[in-house]
Amino acid sequence: MENDGGICLMVMQNGIKAKNIILLRKSPDSKKNLFLVHDGTGSIGGYFQFAWYIHQDFNVYGILPIVPIKGEDYLGPFPFSIKDIADSYRGILDSFMGDTVVYITGWSTGGSIAFEMVYGWQKEGRRVNFLGLFDVLPPENEKQDIVFYNIKSESDFLLPFIAKAALKEKLVNCEDVRSFWNLIQWELTELDWMREKFFLAEGNQWGKIIPNYQKLPLKELFLMINVIRSYHKAGIEYLPEGKVENQIHYFQAAHSVIKRVDDWRPYCHRFICHQVPGGHYTMLNSDNAPALSEIFNKVLGDT
């Protein structure tokens, strides 16, 4: 059993046991498989309600990160690229799926990963029937290099929310980012951490991204925050090497803050945008999943 919400099964197919491929819903009479790539938090929990509305012709699987990104002993951010992730997932799915046709979708940063997976499959000559993007940040016009992972970036991010002056002094004098986050892990306590101030600070989205932030222990909370920061950085820096021959079906949340979605057009054979209810963080919740799935199933049925 996997426990990203408590309803999923790790699966084996073609003799391949894939720990990061999670069965969300089984169709008894179909060999068609729809894969949903984890979101920018590394979770597939947002898909649980949605999966039950998917057309009965499809088995529905979630794709989780392969391993804890940096292990349990490091809480800080870490460098990786969308291409690195996509290449690793594609290799696992190739073994898992055999020669079946690909149907794949991703939400948020997961959509960028799904796109890059399809681009890689295209170069290998594999058939992809469907590519869906759920409210995914479009590529910039040129490759971005977002600077963090240095003492200044981490100090600016965290120090305004630490009460203990002596700890703040130690942190700004750390030699590197690993030392900075090791010190956070060893010395920061709940009494020194202004949790509410951090999550409710004007202009940030952390309270929406991690709605249960009040209940999480510090170690788990900082690990989650830095997983999200690292996926966000990879997504912003992502610039596809070329275009896919597929249509992109883009599902845009009505109240999304993501702009320039048409910037995906140069990267595909045809770009089709579908307006769906909700915002970026709510488009798949219990209120909006039925309406989204109705549109999604119609598009999926036409492929």
Image (tube, rainbow, N blue to C red):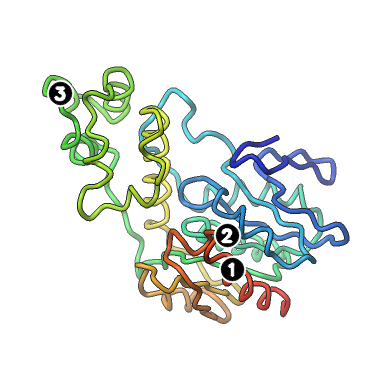
Q: Nearer the viewer, residue 194 or 158?
A: 194
Give the residue number, with chain letter if any, for mark 3.
164
Q: How far apart, in angstroms, are the residues tagged by discs 2 and 3? A: 43 Å
Give the residue number, with chain letter if any, for mark 2.
114
Give the residue number, with chain letter if any, for mark 1.
132
Q: Is residue 291 above or below residue 210?
A: below
User: Label 1 amino acid?
Assistant: Gly
Q: How far apart, in angstroms, are the residues tagged by discs 1 and 2? A: 8 Å
Residue drawn at (29%, 31%) of the image: 177
User: Label 3 amino acid?
Assistant: Lys
Quarter that holds the C terminus: bottom right
User: Label 2 amino acid?
Assistant: Ala
Given the current orientation, which residue lies at the most extreme front position?
287
Q: Is residue 213 above or below residue 133?
A: above
Q: Residue 46: percent from the left, percent from the top?
A: 54, 53
The residue carrying pointer 1 sits among few (fewer than 14), some (14 to 19) or many (20 or more) residues within 10 Å by Cα, namely: many
Residue drawn at (32%, 27%) of the image: 178
Q: Secondary structure at mark 3?
A: loop
The residue carrying pointer 3 sits among few (fewer than 14), some (14 to 19) or many (20 or more) residues within 10 Å by Cα, namely: some
Quarter that holds the N terminus: top right
Q: Nearer the viewer, residue 209 or 169?
A: 209
